[in-house]
Image: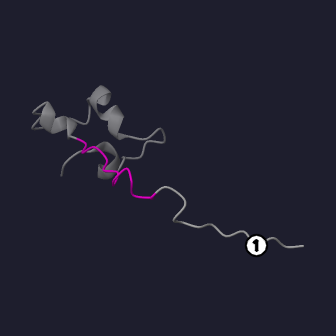
């Protein structure tokens, strides 16, 4: 026996009632600290921008500017 289950969208809450989700704009850490030259030997500073496997994280993840 099959049961017809139909969802009536008008009965449920409107999907856009909370408004669009906008993520916070990430700020470049180098611009905030006013760093003109990024030294590759400063491991403590660069650790945030490298994955656990040693790959450079993308701009959209870290928030750095070009």
Percent position (x, y) of residue 46?
Answer: 30, 34
Residue 41 visible within the image: yes
- Label 1 environment density (alpha carbons within 10 Å; few <14, some 14–19, many ≥20): few
Q: Residue at x 37, y 50 (%)?
A: 18
Whether residue 23 is in magenta: the answer is: yes
Q: Residue at x 31, y 43 (%)?
A: 62
Q: Quadrant of the N terminus?
A: bottom right
User: Between 7 and 20, which is closer to the camera in this rendering?
Assistant: 7
Q: Residue at x 26, y 31 (%)?
A: 41
Could you tell me which secondary element the residue under label 1 belongs to? loop
Percent position (x, y) of residue 40?
Answer: 25, 36
Relative to 65, is 1 on the left or the right? right
Q: Which residue is mark 1?
A: 4
Relative to 65, is 24 on the left or the right? right
Q: Which residues are magenta?
A: 14-26
Percent position (x, y) of residue 7?
Answer: 63, 66
Residue 38 visible within the image: no
Relative to 51, is 22 on the left or the right? left
Most common secondary structure along the magenta stretch: loop
Whether residue 10 is in magenta: the answer is: no
């Amino acid at each position: 026996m099959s049961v017809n289950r139909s969802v009536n969208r008008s009965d449920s809450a409107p999907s856009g009632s909370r408004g669009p989700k906008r993520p916070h704009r990430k700020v470049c850490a180098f611009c905030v600290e006013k760093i003109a030259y990024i030294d590759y030997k400063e491991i403590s500073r660069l650790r945030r921008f490298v994955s656990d496997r040693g790959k450079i994280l993308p701009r959209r993840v870290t928030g750095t500017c070009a």
